[in-house]
Amino acid sequence: MAFKKYLVILKIIVLVSACNTNEKSSEIINDMSDQKIQFTDAQIDFLGITDTNHLSAASKRALKWRTDLGNEWFIQFGPLKPLKGDLAYEEGVVRRDPSAIIKENGKYYVWYTKSTGPTQGFGGDIENEKVFPWDRCDIWYATSVDGWTWKEEGMAVSRGEKGAYDDRSVFTVEIMKWEDKFYLCYQAVKSPYNVRVKNTVGLAWSDSPNGPWTKSKEPILVPADNGIWKGEKQNRFLVEKKGDFDSHKVHDPCIIPYKGKFYLYYKGEQMGEAITFGGRQIRHGVAIADKPEGPYVKSPYNPISNSGHEICVWPYAGGIASLITTDGPEKNTIQWAPDGINFEIMSVIPGVNAHAIGLNRTADNEKEPTEILRWGLTHVYNNADYQSIMRFSSERKTTHVAKGETK
Ligand code: AAL
């Protein structure tokens, strides 16, 4: 063992000294993982590394970063601002998880989760009480001319009849327009809503953004069925086997027409969820279909993120970009996948205050990588019981100068 280690170290010394005589590019063997690291003199200069014979773990990591990235993907979010009209905060009412915004008939449209009354939680009579703010909800919609003052138009999709897969709550909706048809995908829960309940994803379609909406008879996405609970007690952390990343919940669905198919991005929650060094174990997956209504087949590459929370994805430069917030070691990053599946970090941004983002799909998303994030909708917790929809904004940050200093 010791000899093997000695040989590896020797190999490093030989290779690094060989590297030093080569002015153009060089290569070392990483003693920890035996992985090859390529680097150039320009990289060493840019990273300010003082001695290539003594590369710290941080320097080795930095040498693996992409070299072609500037600040094109680097942004900061501004303060959230309240909406006016019917979507202004209303005590006693939950309005949250706004969909993307689309423009039809000269007006912006948004769909969202709505319910009334306080949340009791899981401690009492779950058959009759509200366990989460998003329990006992329906999907409503509103319109606006300027994106600030909104008129609530009414309910779009209601909970199903008793016994249906969506009889308890329908919530966290997204909108997709495709070939003059409108599609709402959303989360659905069947009663009883206990901590081990497995939710599903439903779909509804209409010829008009004003409805009426036809609901799919069956869910279009369900959690993986390969986890095993431990014991009968209602405890979501006790498992014999955790199963896939989405063995408990499939959340935050968002369908994007992409490469002649339909990519349904979603957040997975796993049975026996752990808290790791990055926080909650939350990851994203994708399921792909030939038609908007499915069938959706989960990608064998899932999970496609190891971090994040609500799905926030948009097409850019032939690939798909994704804002990764809240949970996991790669939270507060913007990532991009040239194929919609293999995401790489493009920027690490300051803490994101805009959660459950509803993107402005009317933006010119190809103008620059984050153009679609200039403004949109999000929600805030006014208190533990009630949430309201707010407006977010973001800006690119390209310089860092002192007062009076010019760039
Ligand atoms: C959100 C989303 C989903 C969850 C709940 C409502 O942050 O991840 O929508 O179910 O919380």
Image (spheres, rainbow, N blue to C red):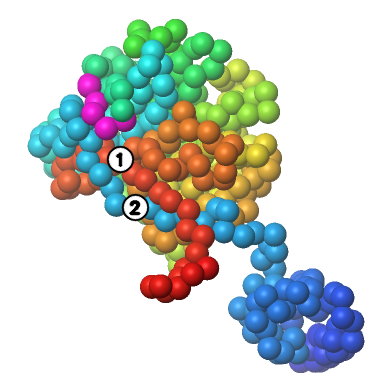
Query: Looking at the picture, does residue 78 appear above or below residue 217?
Result: below
Q: Residues within 10 Å of mark 1 (few under 14, many from 20)?
A: many
The quarter of the picture where residue 194 lies is top left
Sequence-first tag of 2 and 1 = 2
| Dot 2 amino acid type | Gly
Q: Residue at x 55, y 53 (%)?
A: 73
Ligand 1 lies under 8 Å from the Cβ of mark 1:
no
Rendered-image quadrant of the N terminus: bottom right
Does the stretch in magenta take in 150? yes
Q: Name the one closer to the observer, 73 or 31.
A: 73
Is 195 placed left or right of 16 in the picture?
left
Q: Name the one closer to the observer, 354 or 148.
A: 148
Q: Which residues are magenta?
A: 147-152
- Give the image location of residue 236, x and y in percent: 35, 49
Q: Residue at x 17, y 46 (%)?
A: 382
Ligand 1 lies under 8 Å from the Cβ of mark 2:
no
Helix, strand or loop status at disc 1: strand
- Residue 117 in view of the camera: yes
- Give the image location of residue 390, x and y in percent: 27, 40
Q: Residue at x 16, y 43 (%)?
A: 385
| Dot 1 amino acid type | Arg
Query: Residue 137 has which mark?
Result: none
Check disc 2 and report the residue beneath it. Answer: 78
Q: Name the one closer to the observer, 163 or 222.
A: 222
- Residue 327 in view of the camera: no
Check disc 1 and report the residue beneath it. Answer: 391
Q: Residues within 10 Å of mark 2 (few under 14, many from 20)?
A: some
